[in-house]
Image (cartoon, grey):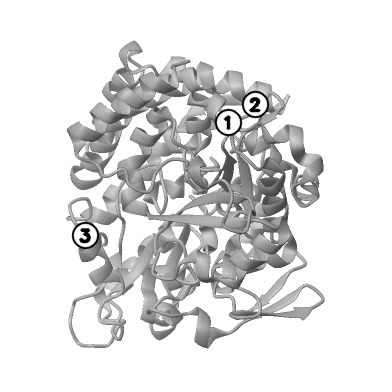
Amino acid sequence: MKSRSLRKAAALVAALTAMLPLSGCGSDKSASVDENGKPVVTIKVRRNITSHPMKDTQYSKDLEAACDCTIKWDEIIDSAWDQQKSATLVAGEFPDIGLTLYSPSDVSQYPEEFLDLSQYLDKMPNVEKFFQDRPTARKMVEDDGHIYILPSDRGENYRISATHLIINKTWLDKLGLEMPTTWDELEQVLIAFKNEDPNGNGQTDEIPMQIRDVSFGLWSPLTLLNSTGLTTSFMGSSASTQGFYVKDGKVQSYLVSDELKDVIAFYHKLMDEGLIPKDSFTRDDSQYAAQTQSDGKTALTGVSFGWSNVSEYDDLADQYVTVPPLKQTADMSDDEVKWDYTQDSTEFAYALTVRSDAEHQDEIFKIIDAMYSEKLSVAGYYGSIPDVVSDDGEHTYTIDKSKAYIEGRNDTAAIALQDRFAGYIPDEVVVNNDTSVKDKEANEPCEEVLSRVDPVKDVIPVYVRPNAEDMETLTNDNTAMMNFVTNQLATWIQDGGIEDEWDSYLEQVRSPSLGLERDIEIWQKYYDQATQ
């Protein structure tokens, strides 16, 4: 355990070397009370929009009323926090309350800096109720009985998969085509999209299918692994994003599976037929968006992977719907098909920490308990009550669209904390005019299949978390492994050759130097501990 002075020295060297500004970081004990003698509690929050300060909101005033204290908000833009985070961790500079600043890996590296909140749950009955209602959320943050970080729950509208296969339904209807249910049927639809001018502009400018890359993450084309019977969970730092899954209680790797081979061969066939752009792996985000969102009037893209039709296609969203999970072959049973199981990662987030030596802890616990009340959870996520959101009673609230959706956005991040909040929005809560309802609707075609996924036997749960030492091993192995694997997969999709080169690839991936077997053993150990 490093001393505070050594950390500060190291941080100073790092800061001078990188020329990173550290203003606004750290704790300020000089202002422990305000001019009226009230305790001062500092809340530091990472936001992607800071033009509407939290200190000016009714939400902040309601928190201050709950604690009978003064809250000093320290807001930092995402990009600045990305630069400053490492140096402040080493320096031991932590706010009284941190909102979405730290991850479990940060906590595991510096446990002495974070307050063990498990000892104080009786002072936060709303947090206790949250954990009773959502045991998975507690499992995500509890480590050998300790809780150094609290999760948030933004409600059932986010209990969805993070990735969907999205298709232009307007094009299907115009060409008299049925929704595809298998890979072969998808291929035939894409051929029609290419050849039959479904956007009706008389040009051969249609792009039948778009893919981004072959990473094991959000919106990956490898999500089609679910068609083969394997379950993915491509979000965050899950085992799945590192290439691991579980079947019959045994941790295995997608990277050496026949199912991965089938998926890559299918994509090569589509690219070879001109149904996927050859430059799919070299375009930047702006070029991709220009082809999916186009000019907002004439659609160019037939099929792609994304969060929802709204986020993926913007003004063209009404033309698009989610494809129900496809079967690899028509003779598969319904029960064999899976879909990307990321509901826990989309609904819950790692939200709140408390500095271990924070002053005014009683006031801090009152703030946290207020944050996790129903009303202030809604206000923290969507906007202050009654300024932006009205409380209509019976767990029902209404967003004033004229005040909430500003600056050309379809969310309330400009005037509320949104996904940077700490709180719990129960299922009985109804929020009228909430745009996330569209995301829930986009997930509906996948819900039947998702209901058949066993969250323990078919996927390595999100709360399976190796310790800091083992995670470092996994991370180092994964970096080397994925550099090789993703480049090879992209090459096969573009140029073919997987049938001839697969055995050689397996030998390289299983090479002891890449650590695949070691990593499987690590994940197996923690999977068994968490699920047995």
Tell me: residue 391, above or below residue 365. Answer: below
Residue bearing the label numbered 1: 246
- Give the SS element for disc 3: loop
Residue 430 sits in quarter: bottom right
Q: Which residue is mark 2?
A: 249
Circle 3 residue: 277
Kind of residue at disc 3: Pro
Name which residue lies at 58% across and 84% down.
400
> Looking at the picture, which amino acid does disc 1 mark?
Val
Q: Position of residue 212 (x, y in %)?
A: 30, 54
Whole-number angstrom distance, CA of label 2 to CA of label 1:
6 Å
Q: Secondary structure at mark 2?
A: loop
Q: How far across and down, in percent of the image, does residue 503 sit?
A: 31, 23
**Residue type at numbered disc 2:** Gly
Q: Is residue 187 above or below residue 203?
A: above
**Residue nearest the observer in this picture, 441 or 324:** 441
